[in-house]
Image (cartoon, coloured by chain):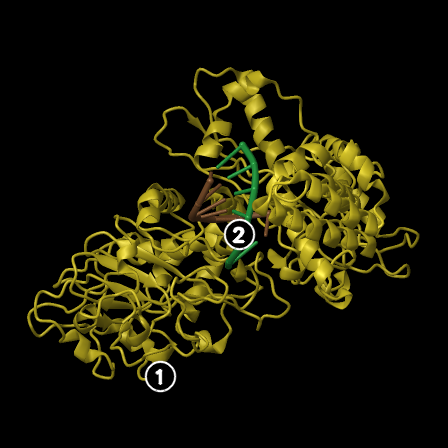
Chain colours: A yellow, B green, C brown
DNA sequence: ATTAGGG
DNA sequence: CCCTAAT
């Protein structure tokens, strides 16, 4: 059985490794695992794990959040067992296995053939008993999931070989029962609140895993579990993971050796696509445990999320322990952060729909810019949507929109009671500003439903002149993604860049002076001109020296950051808390401009490779967003670019001249380095350098070297 | 905090 | 760009 690296986890609770970057694109799989304290495994825990996994990936976070919304839950529920139909938005697969061990582990990883599981001791395998807790597709082949859910698993020995409760907590002890929810059942609130056993599943004889139940004699505690989780997100339900078509799903499949993911230290033999759940040979029973909690989550926000957060935190708290034990660098979740905020703001609060007023388009002279300026005018800004796809041919009818206001996504602010009103204002302002400056998505809703296809015309979408009031809505959402548009082609949002972490964070509510503030800047919304913000990123002035300053300054100016005094910073716990809660994000991608490349090359030519800090200081001292690591990386890519054929190069083409300089500088400094190691004779070095550089027609080399 | 490399 | 290991 799987259980590779069981020993990787030497702590209670569980960690949720970051989702490999690869998962940002469709059809990528991720792996994660979870360890459960004692013999308890709860559906919620599992889901939380999955959720946490997803959340850890900032770009996916909202996706998950959406999934948590009540609307989608049903879909999840009904599709859990129907993933083959591909008509759902997310399906969950989970399976667990039993093992004689003191603790339980949740492996959300692809089942690894026993033979290939490198990290578990051979003696572990035999004692392994898999008990499928989730009816998944492969299980369905042999029996109906619905039935499975309602069957009772009995242990002839007087106990249950495996007990899983879909309740908040799953008891692994024998005698416990499986609580499951019918996939088709719609839970009532009452039911949702019940945490006790609901139904007992008895594995039908059909279940190929029955023998597993009869497995070990001892009070077979559910000690270890192996779970494979597959989640599919369909564009329609997942705004962040938008795909061209509904069929284009994202599979979040647990597998340890996810390609490119730093999942497993030990490369496992190539696996079949996750779809074919491997090793059915293992006796497994599965049970869908998602539905209930997925449905429930949106409602019991406080409980759910706090719990959730706790879980996540626990993972983080144990990071060090984890790290120390963990053999490889498999799970780079070190600095991953998630926003609790987005989850909720996206699912409900964040979506503020606005009114629309349609009117027969008479103004043919108006173009889309007019439309947008109008849109944004409401927010006090005008911007040019970078992602505007809709085509407004001049002869089209025009849809007039009037957005009365945007509601800012939910904000959570914590401030001491002793704080002054003024500081509260500043705090709120700061939070709001941070959000706005952080980048927002504009979502389009029609009939309350998100419109995700950016490529449809308004007409096709149904946003036409004869629209009725209220049919169309817009929403501002925290932009979770720095994803390139290509990653979410179906998204209906206008992505705006962000550079700073969302200040939103859910703080422990145990603070007496927690004030929750929801900001609604209706009267005089101060929105940054994000459109320009974008454009400025790559639009540098010609002067390599001051261009960075300029752009930086401009960007900031555009973000309409209110003058924030140090005092404010001191007074607002938001900052501290934000950092504390590790709310951060992947930095936005900022392609190097040619000018920057030029500056970099020049600096490296002079300073050589390996002195990135100096390079930074010298040429990018004013570009705060460029760290020496960035520069180093850029050099690396430049070098690579220079070495590959022009046809293989992508992105903004770098002048061959620069690339040549890169090559020259690289070879030169490489030799330099080598020489230094052998015989630190400055003279020969100089000679070599000069010959090389001059040969490469670097006129300014000398100056730079001298200067 | 930097540097070097792998991802 | 991120993440780590090693300085």
Q: Determine whether, in the image, residue A92 is placed left or right of residue A130.
A: right
Q: Based on the displayed image, in which of its 4 quarters is residue A643 positioned? A: bottom right
Q: Which structural element holds mark 2?
A: helix
Residue A507, quarter of the rendered image:
top left
Q: To which chain does the residue with label 2 belong? A: A
Q: Is residue A110 above or below residue A21?
A: below
- Residue A429 placement (x, y as % from top left): 60, 27
User: Of A680 and A606, which appears nearest the observer?
Assistant: A680
Quadrant where the image shows the C terminus of chain A? top right
Within-10-Å neighbours for mark 1: few <14, some 14–19, many 20+:
few
- For label 1, the residue is A141
Of the numbered discs in the image, which one, if any, rests on residue A302? none
The answer to whether A341 is drawn above or below residue A664 in the figure is above
Q: Residue at x 51, y 55 (%)?
A: A66
Label 1 secondary element: loop
Instruction: Point out the image quarter for the N terminus of chain A.
Output: bottom left
Q: Position of residue A365 (x, y in %)?
A: 93, 52
**From mark 1 to mark 2, how far is it between C-alphas?**
33 Å
The residue at which mark 2 appears reads as A62
């Amino acid at each position: 059985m799987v259980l590779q690296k069981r020993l990787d986890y030497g702590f209670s609770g569980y960690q949720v490794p970051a989702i490999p970057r690869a998962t940002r694109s469709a059809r990528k799989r991720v792996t994660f695992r979870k360890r459960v304290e004692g013999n308890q495994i709860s559906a919620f825990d599992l889901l939380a794990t999955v959720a946490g996994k997803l959340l850890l990936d900032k770009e996916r976070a909202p996706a998950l959040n959406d999934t948590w919304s009540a609307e989608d839950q049903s879909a999840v529920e009904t599709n859990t067992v129907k993933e083959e139909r591909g008509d759902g938005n997310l399906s969950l697969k989970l399976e667990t296995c039993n093992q004689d061990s003191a603790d339980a582990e949740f492996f959300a990883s692809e089942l690894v053939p026993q033979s290939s599981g490198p990290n578990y001791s051979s003696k572990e395998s035999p004692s392994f008993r898999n008990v499928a807790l989730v009816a998944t597709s492969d299980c369905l082949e042999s029996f109906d999931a619905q039935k499975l859910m309602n069957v009772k698993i009995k242990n002839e020995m007087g106990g249950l070989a495996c007990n899983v409760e879909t309740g908040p907590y799953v008891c692994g002890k024998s005698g416990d029962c499986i609580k499951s929810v019918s996939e088709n059942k719609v839970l009532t609130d009452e039911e949702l609140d019940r945490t006790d056993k609901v139904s007992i599943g008895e594995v039908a004889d059909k279940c190929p895993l029955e023998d597993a139940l009869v497995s070990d004699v001892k009070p077979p505690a559910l000690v270890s579990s192996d779970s494979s989780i597959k989640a599919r997100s369909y564009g329609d339900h997942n705004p962040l993971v938008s795909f061209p078509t509904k069929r284009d799903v994202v599979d979040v499949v647990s597998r340890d050796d996810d390609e490119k993911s730093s999942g497993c230290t030990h490369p496992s033999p190539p696996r079949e696509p996750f779809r074919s759940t491997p090793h059915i040979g293992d006796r497994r029973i599965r049970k869908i445990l998602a539905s209930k909690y997925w449905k429930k989550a949106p409602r019991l926000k406080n409980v759910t999320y706090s719990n959730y957060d706790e879980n996540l935190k626990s993972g983080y708290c144990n990071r060090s322990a984890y790290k120390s034990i963990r053999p490889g660098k498999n799970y780079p979740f070190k600095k991953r952060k998630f926003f609790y905020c987005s989850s909720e703001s996206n699912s409900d609060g964040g979506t503020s729909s606005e009114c629309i007023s349609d009117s027969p388009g008479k103004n043919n002279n108006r173009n889309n810019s007019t439309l947008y300026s109008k849109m944004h005018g409401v927010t006090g800004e005008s911007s040019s949507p970078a992602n505007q796809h809709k085509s407004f041919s001049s002869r089209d009818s025009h849809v007039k929109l009037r957005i009365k206001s945007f509601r800012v996504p939910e904000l959570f602010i914590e401030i001491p009671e002793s704080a002054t009103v003024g500081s509260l204002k500043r705090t709120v302002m700061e939070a709001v500003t941070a959000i706005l400056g952080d980048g927002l998505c504009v979502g389009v809703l029609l009939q309350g439903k998100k419109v995700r296809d950016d490529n449809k015309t308004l007409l096709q979408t149904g946003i036409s002149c004869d629209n009725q009031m209220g049919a169309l809505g817009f929403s501002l959402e925290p932009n979770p993604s720095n994803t390139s548009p290509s990653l979410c082609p179906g998204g209906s949002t206008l992505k705006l860049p962000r550079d700073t972490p969302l200040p939103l964070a859910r703080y422990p509510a145990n603070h007496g002076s927690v004030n929750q503030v929801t900001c609604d800047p209706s009267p005089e919304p101060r929105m940054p001109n994000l459109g320009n913000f974008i454009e400025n990123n790559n639009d540098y002035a010609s002067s390599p020296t001051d261009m960075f300053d300029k752009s930086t300054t401009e960007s900031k100016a555009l973000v309409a950051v209110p003058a924030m005094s140090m005092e404010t910073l001191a007074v607002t716990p938001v900052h501290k808390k934000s950092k504390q809660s590790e709310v951060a994000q992947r930095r936005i991608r900022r392609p190097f401009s040619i000018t920057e490349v030029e500056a970099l090359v020049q600096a490296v030519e002079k300073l050589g490779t390996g002195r990135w800090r100096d390079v930074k200081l010298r040429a990018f001292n004013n570009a705060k967003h460029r760290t020496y690591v960035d520069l180093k990386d850029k050099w690396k890519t430049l070098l690579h670019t220079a070495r590959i054929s022009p046809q293989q190069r992508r992105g903004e083409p770098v002048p061959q001249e620069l690339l040549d300089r890169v090559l020259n500088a690289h070879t030169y400094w490489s030799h330099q380095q080598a020489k230094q190691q052998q015989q630190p004779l400055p003279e020969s070095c100089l000679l070599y350098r000069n010959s090389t550089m001059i040969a490469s027609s670097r006129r300014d080399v000398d100056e730079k070297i001298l200067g």
